[in-house]
Image (cartoon, rainbow, N blue to C red):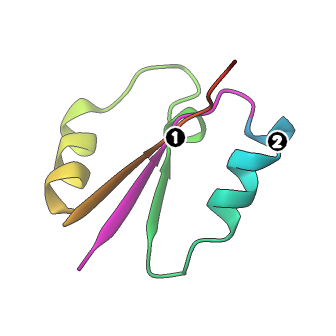
Amino acid sequence: MKTTVFLFHPKMRQSRVNAALANSLDDDIEVRDLYALYPDFKIDVAKEQDALAAADRVVLQFPMYW
């Protein structure tokens, strides 16, 4: 079963919780850091749709601000 984590955090270097979660994942889990992949915000929609379709399990990881 292929797991893909789509990571959405604008300041990952400053994050403690989200960074710890992302860094603790097994090597066979694909992590797609959208801010790192598309710093100019020009997202390759077709590529991301393909990544989403290829995954058996999808995790959306993003910061929660209280």
* SS label for mark 2: helix
Query: Quick one: 36 or 60, which is closer to the camera?
Result: 60
User: What's the CA distance linking mark 1 and mark 2?
Assistant: 15 Å
The residue beneath circle 2 is: 13
Q: Position of residue 10 (x, y in %)?
A: 66, 27
Query: Quick one: 28 or 18, which is closer to the camera?
Result: 18
Outermost residue, front side: 66
Query: Quick one: 32 or 14, which is closer to the camera?
Result: 14
| Segment colored magenta | 1-11
State the residue at coordinates (80%, 40%). Answer: 15
Camera-near label (1 vs 2) is 2
State the residue at coordinates (75%, 48%). Answer: 17
Q: Is residue 56 left or right of residue 35?
A: left
Q: Amino acid at mark 2?
A: Arg
The residue beneath circle 1 is: 37
Q: Is residue 43 left or right of residue 41?
A: left
Does label 1 or label 2 sit earlier along the sequence? 2
